[in-house]
Image (cartoon, rainbow, N blue to C red):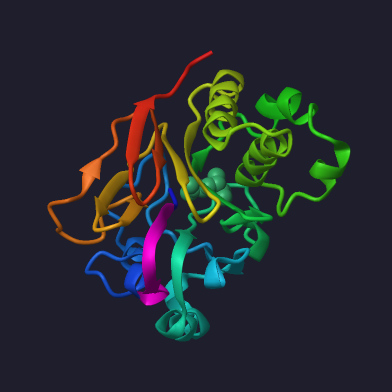
C-alpha cells in the first residue's frame, strides 16, 4: 500500500530519486516488492514536494500512475532540491481517487505522507476527528484516512508540539481508536524527517551528508538498513535516531 520516500542532503535532480535508480519510486509504483494489507500496484496517484532554494515547499500531485504522466518526467529531469518527499498511491478501497488524495499533504514548511490504512474508517476515528476545528474537517484535501491523519498531526504542530511528538502521539491515539491500522508516516520541514514503522516496511540509508528514508531500498547499496517495526525515526543529514513508538 503506497510507497513513499524522504530525502535530505546535497541538491539532487528529482529524477535521481523518482526515476533513475534500478528500483526507483516509479518502479515501485508498478512492481513493488513488499506490499502488505491489500493492494498490488500503486497506480492511483502520486505526488512530490520539494524545497526550491530551501524556501517553502512546492508540490506536484496527480491522480494517475506516475509512469503515465510525461510532465513529472520532464520536471524531475531538470528540478534540483536538497529536500524531497514523494509518494505513489494505492487507494484503499472506498477512498477517493483525486489529486488532493495523493501525498504529500502540506502546510507552511511541512510535508506529510501516510503509507497504510485506518481500519474501521471513518467511524473508528470520529471521536478523534471531533477534537479538530470544524474548519479543518471542511477543508481536508480529500475525504481519506490519510488526509485526516495529516489534519490530526497538523493540529498538534500548530499547537507547538515537537514534530516527533506530534507524529508519535497521533499514531498512538489512532492505533488505539482503530486497532489493526497501518500507520507508516513521513513528516519533514526540509531539515529533518520524522518517520514511523507501524504495519509497513521502511528503510534508511545515511551517508556523505545525505539521508534517505524509503518504503523499499531503491538500489542494492549495502548502506540500506531496515527500520524495525514499531519504531519512530528522526533523521537529519548528520544523525539518524530510532526509538520504539510509545503506546497508549
Ligand atoms: N489509505 C490511504 C489512501 O487510500 C493510503 C493508502 C496506501 O498506503 N496504500 O490514500
In this rendered view, identify the residue nearer to me: 4 or 90.
Answer: 4
User: Can residue 230 be seen in this snapshot?
Assistant: no
Which quadrant, please, contains the C terminus? Answer: top right
Q: Quadrant of residue 21?
A: bottom left
In this rendered view, identify the residue nearer to me: 235 or 203.
Answer: 235
In this rendered view, identify the residue nearer to me: 94 or 226.
Answer: 226
| Image spot of residue 76 (x, y percent) | 44, 79
Any magenta on residue 14? Answer: yes
Q: Main secondary structure of the magenta part?
A: strand
| Image spot of residue 189 (x, y percent) | 55, 52
- Which range is magenta? 3-15
| Image spot of residue 18 (x, y percent) | 38, 69
Q: Is residue 179 left or right of residue 214?
A: right
In the rendered view, would you say 6 is above or below 129? below
In the rendered view, would you say 141 is above or below 201? below
Q: Quadrant of residue 203?
A: top left
| Image spot of residue 241 (x, y percent) | 34, 34
Residue at 56% from the left image edge and 56% from the top image edge: 103
Any magenta on residue 60? Answer: no
Amino acid at each position: 500500500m503506497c510507497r513513499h520516500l524522504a530525502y535530505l542532503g546535497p541538491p539532487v535532480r528529482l529524477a535521481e530519486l523518482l526515476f533513475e535508480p534500478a528500483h526507483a519510486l516509479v518502479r515501485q509504483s508498478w512492481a513493488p516488492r513488499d506490499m502488505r494489507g491489500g493492494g498490488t500496484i500503486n497506480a492511483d496517484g502520486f505526488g512530490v514536494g520539494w524545497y526550491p532554494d530551501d524556501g517553502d515547499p512546492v508540490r506536484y500531485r496527480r491522480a494517475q500512475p506516475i509512469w503515465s504522466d510525461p510532465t513529472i518526467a520532464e520536471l524531475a529531469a531538470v528540478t534540483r532540491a536538497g529536500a524531497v518527499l514523494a509518494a505513489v498511491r494505492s487507494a484503499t478501497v472506498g477512498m477517493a481517487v483525486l489529486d488532493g488524495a495523493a501525498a504529500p499533504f502540506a502546510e507552511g514548511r511541512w510535508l506529510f505522507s501516510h503509507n497504510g490504512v485506518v481500519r474501521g474508517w471513518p467511524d473508528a476515528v470520529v471521536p478523534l476527528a471531533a477534537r479538530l476545528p470544524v474548519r479543518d474537517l471542511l477543508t481536508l484535501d480529500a475525504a481519506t484516512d490519510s488526509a485526516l491523519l495529516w489534519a490530526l498531526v497538523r493540529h498538534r504542530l500548530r499547537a507547538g508540539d515537537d514534530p516527533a511528538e506530534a507524529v508519535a502521539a497521533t499514531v498512538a491515539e489512532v492505533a488505539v481508536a482503530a486497532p489493526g491500522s497501518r500507520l507508516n508516516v513521513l513528516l519533514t520541514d526540509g531539515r529533518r524527517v520524522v518517520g514511523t514503522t507501524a504495519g509497513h516496511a521502511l528503510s534508511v540509508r545515511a551517508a556523505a551528508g545525505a539521508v534517505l528514508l524509503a518504503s523499499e531500498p531503491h538500489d542494492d547499496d549495502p548502506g540500506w538498513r531496515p527500520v524495525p517495526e514499531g519504531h519512530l525515526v528522526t533523521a537529519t543529514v548528520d544523525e539518524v535516531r530510532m526509538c520504539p513508538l510509545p503506546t497508549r
